[in-house]
Image (cartoon, rainbow, N blue to C red):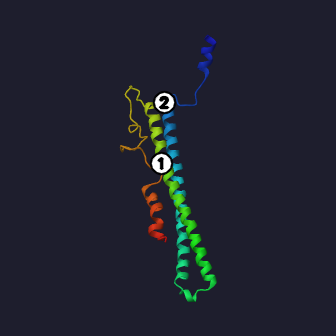
């Protein structure tokens, strides 16, 4: 038994002796939270980039279509009519793609909201002060101080851009 005690005393931790396991777990949770925020922001930016590219392409095609539509019917060639139909189909496909993108953003926003609620419920019991008083997640700065959990990985500005871009900027159909 003395040999076992001697061996355990010989083990030296890499951690500073003043750092507790709870301190390390707390820091790991904060880092995980920051990582999640960054992953969500990256996803938001990718959606926004895709949306901007779609809107730019739709706008370009609409300008070309507008030029063709402005030609009087009697002056239109067969190529012009074919090109008009082709442009309408391309615009329609891009609008459909953008609609899927907006739906996907909304789905992701709802999924993230559910994840936030589940994580807050999971973490709540883990945050207790050493004195035994239960600390709220707000005290631990894990959740914003509003009465609601984080609701979106898409910022209001980003979501507004996705919803309004083709309605205001592109003026689709």
What residue do we see at 62% from left, 79% from top? 82
**164 up-or-down from 85: above or below:** above
Front position among marks 2 and 1: 1
Residue furthest to the top: 1
Q: How many marks?
A: 2
Residue 173, percent from left and from top: 49, 72
29 and 69: which is toward the camera: 69
Q: Which residue is mark 2?
A: 22
Q: Quadrant of the N terminus?
A: top right
Q: Give the SS element for disc 1.
A: helix
- Residue 79 location, quadrant: bottom right
163 and 50: which is toward the camera: 163
Residue 77, percent from left and from top: 61, 86
Q: Which residue is mark 1?
A: 110
**44 up-or-down from 84: above or below:** above
28 and 116: which is toward the camera: 116
Give the spatial CA distance, label 2 vs label 1.
32 Å
């Amino acid at each position: 038994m003395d040999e076992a005690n001697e061996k355990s005393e010989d083990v030296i931790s890499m951690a500073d002796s003043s750092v507790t396991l709870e301190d390390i777990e707390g820091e790991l949770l904060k880092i995980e939270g920051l990582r999640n925020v960054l992953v969500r922001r990256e996803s938001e930016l990718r959606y926004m980039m895709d949306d901007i590219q779609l809107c730019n392409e739709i706008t370009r095609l609409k300008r070309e279509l507008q030029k063709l539509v402005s030609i009087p019917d009697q002056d239109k060639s067969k190529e012009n009519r074919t090109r008009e139909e082709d442009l309408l189909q391309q615009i329609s496909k891009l609008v459909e793609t953008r609609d899927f993108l907006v739906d996907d953003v909304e789905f992701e926003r709802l999924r993230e909201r559910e994840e936030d609620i589940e994580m807050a419920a999971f973490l709540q019991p883990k945050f207790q002060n050493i004195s035994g008083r239960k600390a709220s997640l707000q005290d631990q700065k894990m959740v914003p101080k509003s009465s609601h959990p984080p609701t979106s990985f898409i910022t209001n500005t980003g979501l507004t851009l996705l919803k309004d871009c083709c309605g205001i900027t592109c003026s689709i159909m």
